[in-house]
Amino acid sequence: MTSGPDFGVDAELSLVGERIREAIRSEEPLLTDIAEYVIDAGGKRIRPTVALLANRAAGGKNLLQTVQIAAALELIHSATLLHDDINDGGLLRRGREAAYKKFGLQNALVAGDFLFVKAFQIGGKFEPDIVDLTARVCTSLAEAEIVQKRQSGDLAVTREQYLDVVLRKTAMPISAGARIGALLGGGTREEVEALTSYGLHLGTAFQIVDDILDVVGDPAVLGKPVGTDLKEGNITLLVLHALNDGSARRAELSRILRRRRKSPDMIGRGLTLIRESGAVDRARVDAEHFGFLAREALEPVRAGPARDALGRLVDFVVRRNM
Amino acid sequence: MTSGPDFGVDAELSLVGERIREAIRSEEPLLTDIAEYVIDAGGKRIRPTVALLANRAAGGKNLLQTVQIAAALELIHSATLLHDDINDGGLLRRGREAAYKKFGLQNALVAGDFLFVKAFQIGGKFEPDIVDLTARVCTSLAEAEIVQKRQSGDLAVTREQYLDVVLRKTAMPISAGARIGALLGGGTREEVEALTSYGLHLGTAFQIVDDILDVVGDPAVLGKPVGTDLKEGNITLLVLHALNDGSARRAELSRILRRRRKSPDMIGRGLTLIRESGAVDRARVDAEHFGFLAREALEPVRAGPARDALGRLVDFVVRRNM
């Protein structure tokens, strides 16, 4: 995994990495290769970082169990990346060829299933409430994919509907890690709820920033082209802001969004329209708002270096450029 | 589900069906629709039947838990059907349009993930050894898909390699149901091992008959065209027998198998070559052989109507025409 900023859990993140490598060993080397390809590609390790910090902030008990859950959540995340790339037809992921392009659609599909199973093999050994929460995360992810696809190009989508997809797609998985970390850590009921809520707000901020970067990010830093959401017809917060602009841009952007097939020129023009509308700045305010809610949620958690690190993680998530 | 022959567990199978319907309820109706589409299409219900009969044969304790596991195994089976159809490009499944054709590839892919998760949500509540066994079934399935694809059109594949794929793809899932059913039923260690072994042999016989039907089955009864294995370049037992024939057929069949793209005429010709080689009869002898091993494996199991039914199930599997 590439290394991100240091939030004081690097040693634990290494354990997570070890647990993942152990889980993806297979008698069939190609499965291991594909799994390693997705997982080595790294990413920001937000999910395991949140789970580990929440564990420590809530008392730090059962660290090794938290490592297991963090590994399971990262495996689920990698599985969805594999399947999402097939679904979106994305050619690049983290600066490299998407796995389904490199290894073939069939192999990538099966490798995604394999990662899901490995995640559940780990998660299935925990208490029933943790199993249920992990399963609900996966169900939410599946539901979000379906809803997002159904709403593709639908200009009637509201801010609430957008936030509901974000909840299921990004906020719930991050929040579940925080909750399980806090439960295992031995937190009070109030701390567990606080860290659950922290995860939801942080996850929402994270997704809004993702959507912003898909409009104004640097493809070289992102490791993938921008404009993917627009191409897919995803009604993101930026699109909603741009459509609320009231100017002539609205009509032109609407036309582009409704097109099922969009040329690169159309996507470029759509991105320009969104940028000119001021939607990026408004979305940044939204991200800051959810970041603020995340920091505020931490208030009932016992003071200490882990809680501080969770606060710094909010800043990192809101200000990141990749 | 369509109704198969009566092995005395129809009431329990209804409970399995109820548990499945409960599991696939989703906030996103399209997911439920796709899941119902695959599951309503029925099939032979071999997996739950084996689990339920093994449970009863081994003492019949924990029936409701066995129903849960049977439901989980059937959900896993349905998930793999969804993903396999995407992988094989199969247009028909059980007489109806394949789900990915009807609902779109992306939706079918996500629905497959959803079914896996629901299976694990059920299975994850059992003892760690049952969770592990269920996970190993899924891992085996994934490995089998990869191996089968890698070996596609490879004329060096041996009978042992064929049987290894069958083990992972079909025999292990059926055997795992038998084993878990027997464990939950309260069987002796010897009975548990006997029923595990029964499942492996029955599953192998089942797959050989599947391969036979793909050569000489009636498409109207099967609900799908024949020749799928040949089209995919799968080196089945029938192909191995036909290639061992030594006649001029061998060269022609080899040429067809090595072609990546095969016309309908080529597939028709390949099927004729296999039929003419006597491979079908030899494969029937193989299926009978594994059926015999399955019946023999039952010997240490306490006598009674459930053991008798497991014996009749062997006859059904070996003689089925769909």
Image: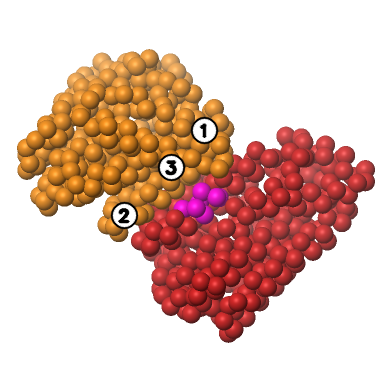
Chain colours: A red, B orange
**Residue under mark 3: which chain is it in?**
B
Q: Amino acid at mark 2?
A: Phe
Alpha carbon separation for disc pair 1 and 3: 13 Å
Q: Secondary structure at mark 2?
A: loop
Across and down, in percent, residue A210 comes to: 69, 58
Question: In this rendering, would A48 be left or right of B45?
Answer: right
A33 left or right, relative to A142: left
The kind of secondary structure element at disc 3 is helix
Q: Quadrant of residue B47?
A: top left
Residue named by callout 1: B33
Near-viewer residue (A241 or B260): A241
Disc 2 sits on a residue from what chain?
A: B
Per the rendering, the mark at residue B126 is 2
What secondary structure is the magenta-colored segment mainly? helix
Compute the Cα span from label 2 to label 1. 28 Å
Residue drawn where x is 54% and y is 27% of the image: B102
* Distance (Cα) linking label 2 and label 3: 16 Å
Which dot marks residue B108? Answer: none
Q: Is residue A179 left or right of residue A68?
A: right
Q: Which residues are magenta?
A: A135-141
Q: Position of residue B242 (x, y in %)?
A: 25, 24
Q: Around disc 1, counting alpha carbons within 10 Å, would you say few (fewer than 14), some (14 to 19), or many (20 or more)?
A: some
Q: In the rendered image, which residue does mark 3 sit on? A: B23
Evaluate whether residue B161 shows in this view: no
Apparent side of residue A10 relative to residue B80 in the rendered image (left or right): right
Check if mark 2's residue and mark 3's residue have beta carbons within 8 Å: no
Q: Is residue B131 visible?
A: yes
